[in-house]
Image (cartoon, grey):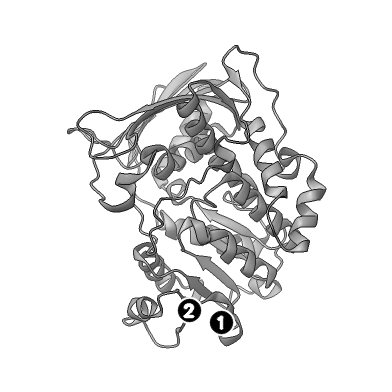
């Protein structure tokens, strides 16, 4: 990726930002943007203009408010867009910004379906603009140190996450079919890709809902992923535990050919090779870390970790886990991507995006990831057209404020 916005190469001038979305997560982003010396907030768009006005009321002057991105682009002349809308609106907002020549930093998940995410990847390729997904839980000093410790372990054979929280969100999450897998697990799945520096091949997943759960859908799940190179990643999580909760990042353990390393999800990192340490928080963590990497990518041309083409694989892990939990069988990631690609080709999209999609041939090649052959197994299944590639992973009903967990 090379910087497509030439003025972004001037570090002396902050990037002019329009933020789209002014719900509770939008307010968190407003605080991050206004605290950063690298950007200047010039506009906030939300379908609820009164909500946008209330969100910026206590900010410094010079922030223009409107009902849409299209309204604010000519009024504010932004350099970049930060998209904090609900997942169902991500594709529309991102495409509008990219086609207008504006790079985008978008909240996770990239899209409500894998097919929608592929369309967004095509939009980024067609326009030559950066679309980065903010997987904010990649940005912890403890996690970065843990990755360094894992590199000491030789060949990693097993990586595990134990996640246990008891949030009482109320609202749409407590009505979802798969609240844990869809709304939370993508953080752990994406982190596993980061730690293993590898890509998922297949998954077997089970989910269920204990009798005492306050969720309508399955609040507990265990998923075993096979990664290329042979490592297994096992996620075991619950959103309805009774005591002894883990960090929001979960508790991690990696076993390799020369040792073992653990991370408590916060500051404590330990390994059998180099001992234990408490890692102080970094200067820029969570969404602040995503913003720093986004700005650096535009200034230097160094590709960030969260590009849409890479993030598609994290979203695919979620869809595959949901499909496996529903079917009881193994789901192959590449088969799921192929199905999503065929669905994406049927979407009504602007011609430049369609032409890019049609030129791909296979989604794995287009996304810069070598396809991995499906594993021989009597449990292996190929997703059908009624599978998760066409199943929305967005919260239902859609939450207009775009609220997120802590």
| The one of 12 and 285 positioned closer to us in this rendering | 285
Q: Position of residue 393 (x, y in %)?
A: 48, 45
Q: Residue sitting at 76 percent across and 56 percent down?
A: 354
- Residue 381 shows in this picture: yes
| The one of 212 and 305 positioned closer to us in this rendering | 212
Residue 53 lies in what quarter of the image?
bottom left
> What element does badge 2 sit on?
loop
Residue that sits furthest to the left in the current view: 243
Q: Position of residue 30 (x, y in %)?
A: 40, 70
The residue at which mark 2 appears reads as 67
Judge left or right: residue 387 versus residue 137: right
Q: Position of residue 162 (x, y in %)?
A: 34, 29
1 and 2 marks in contact (CB < 8 Å): yes
82 vs 139: above or below? below
- Residue 15 shows in this picture: no
Q: How many marks?
A: 2
| The one of 352 and 231 positioned closer to us in this rendering | 352
71 vs 217: above or below? below
Q: Residue sitting at 66 percent across and 53 percent down?
A: 119
How many C-alpha atoms fall within 10 Å of the one at disc 2: few (<14), some, or many (≥20)? some
The residue at which mark 1 appears reads as 71
Q: Position of residue 274 (x, y in %)?
A: 41, 27
Judge left or right: residue 110 versus residue 30: right
């Amino acid at each position: 990726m090379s910087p497509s916005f030439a003025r972004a190469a001037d570090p002396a001038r902050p990037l002019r930002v329009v933020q789209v979305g002014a719900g509770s997560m939008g307010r968190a982003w407003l605080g991050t943007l206004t605290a950063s010396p690298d950007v200047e907030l010039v506009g906030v768009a939300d379908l609820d203009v009164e909500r946008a006005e209330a969100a910026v009321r206590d900010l410094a002057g010079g922030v223009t408010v409107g009902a849409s991105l299209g309204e604010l682009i000519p009024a504010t002349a932004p350099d970049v867009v930060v998209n904090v809308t609900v997942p169902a609106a991500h594709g529309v907002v991102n495409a509008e910004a990219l086609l207008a020549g504006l790079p985008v930093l978008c909240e996770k998940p990239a899209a409500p379906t894998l097919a929608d995410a592929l369309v967004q990847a095509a939009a980024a390729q067609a326009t030559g603009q950066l679309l980065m997904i903010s997987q904010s839980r990649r940005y912890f000093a403890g996690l970065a140190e843990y990755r360094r410790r894992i590199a000491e372990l030789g060949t990693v054979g097993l990586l595990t996450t134990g996640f246990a929280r008891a949030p009482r969100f109320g609202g749409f999450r407590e009505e979802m079919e798969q609240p844990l897998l869809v709304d939370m697990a993508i953080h752990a799945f994406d982190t596993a890709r980061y730690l293993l520096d590898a890509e998922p091949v297949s998954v077997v997943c089970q989910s269920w809902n204990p009798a005492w759960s306050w969720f309508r859908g399955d609040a507990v799940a265990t998923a075993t992923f096979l990664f290329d190179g042979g490592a297994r990643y096992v996620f075991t999580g619950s959103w309805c535990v009774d005591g002894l909760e883990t960090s929001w990042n979960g508790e991690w353990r990696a076993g390799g050919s020369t040792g073992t390393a653990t991370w408590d999800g916060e500051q404590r990192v330990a390994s059998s090779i180099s001992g234990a340490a408490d890692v102080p928080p970094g200067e820029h963590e969570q969404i602040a870390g995503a913003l720093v990497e986004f700005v650096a990518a535009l200034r230097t041309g160094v590709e960030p970790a969260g590009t849409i083409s890479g993030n598609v694989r994290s979203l695919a892990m979620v869809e595959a886990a949901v499909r496996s939990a529903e079917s009881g069988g193994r789901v192959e990631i590449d088969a799921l991507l192929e199905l999503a690609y065929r669905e994406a080709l049927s979407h009504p999209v602007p011609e430049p995006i369609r032409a890019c999609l049609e030129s791909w041939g296979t989604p794995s090649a287009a996304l810069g990831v070598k396809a991995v052959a499906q594993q021989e197994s009597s449990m292996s299944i190929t997703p059908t057209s009624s599978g998760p590639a066409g199943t929305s992973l967005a919260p239902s009903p859609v939450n207009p404020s775009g609220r997120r967990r802590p």
